Image (cartoon, helix red, strand yellow):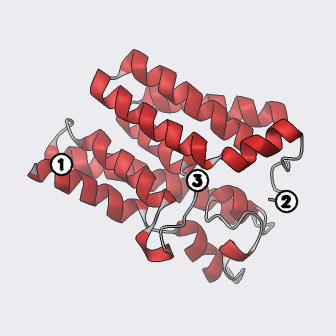
Amino acid sequence: MTDILIAVAIGLVLGSIPFGLVLTRLAGHGDIRSIGSGNIGATNVLRTGNKPLAFATLLLDAGKGAMAVGLAWWLLGPEWAPLAGLAAIISHIHPVWLGFKGGKGVATAIGTLWAIGWPIGLAASLAWLAGAAATRRSSAGSLCSMAAAAVAGFILLAPPIAWALLAVTLYVVWRHKANIQRLLAGTEPRIGKGK
């Protein structure tokens, strides 16, 4: 039980760091939550027009998921490391410092997947690129990446981890419900524009 609590704590602490908010404030763009979708992730940071800042947010948000897995692996061994990554994803979506209103979790999920197993991370990353390239919409890429992650998880991971991953990916998809409605209606903005 102690190992579980430590793994969850690692994920919650790292996942709750709002890099998008911190970086945009340091760069003089104010509160990222006041523009675009209001999210703190890289896609919304891109709407400031600062591509390097958006890329840095992407890397840091992915990195905190990977770091949660790596730190838990180092401290506790491989058994509970995936739990730390899953906790980081949830904590990114619901950071305690921001009233539990954060990003949508995709970058942190992909970073977590790379750390759990690079083939799953690669599958999710390629699926994101394919979906985004085909539609020019980040949300479509995100949905593709989560679908690929869930399928790859059942192929490559132990069943308990695969089922936990499925639950998290379904939650990330649910967080995109407004995007899905706009995709179906043909009103979802292209990458770098609108909400």
Image spot of residue 72 (x, y percent):
24, 49
CA gap, disc 2 and disc 3:
17 Å
Mark with earlier residue (3, 1): 1
Residue 123 visible in image = no
* Residue position for label 1: 4
**Could you tell me which residue is drawn at 47 percent across and 59 percent down?**
92
CA gap, disc 2 and disc 1:
41 Å
- At mark 2, the secondary structure is loop
**Could you tell me which residue is drawn at 56 percent across and 46 percent down?**
106
**Could you tell me which residue is drawn at 56 percent across and 34 percent down?**
146
| Quadrant in the picture for residue 86 | top left
Residue 5 as seen in the image, left or right of residue 82: left
Q: Is residue 59 above or below residue 157?
A: below
* Residue position for label 2: 194
* Residue position for label 3: 104
Depth check, front residue: 150 or 46: 150
Image spot of residue 1 (x, y percent):
10, 48
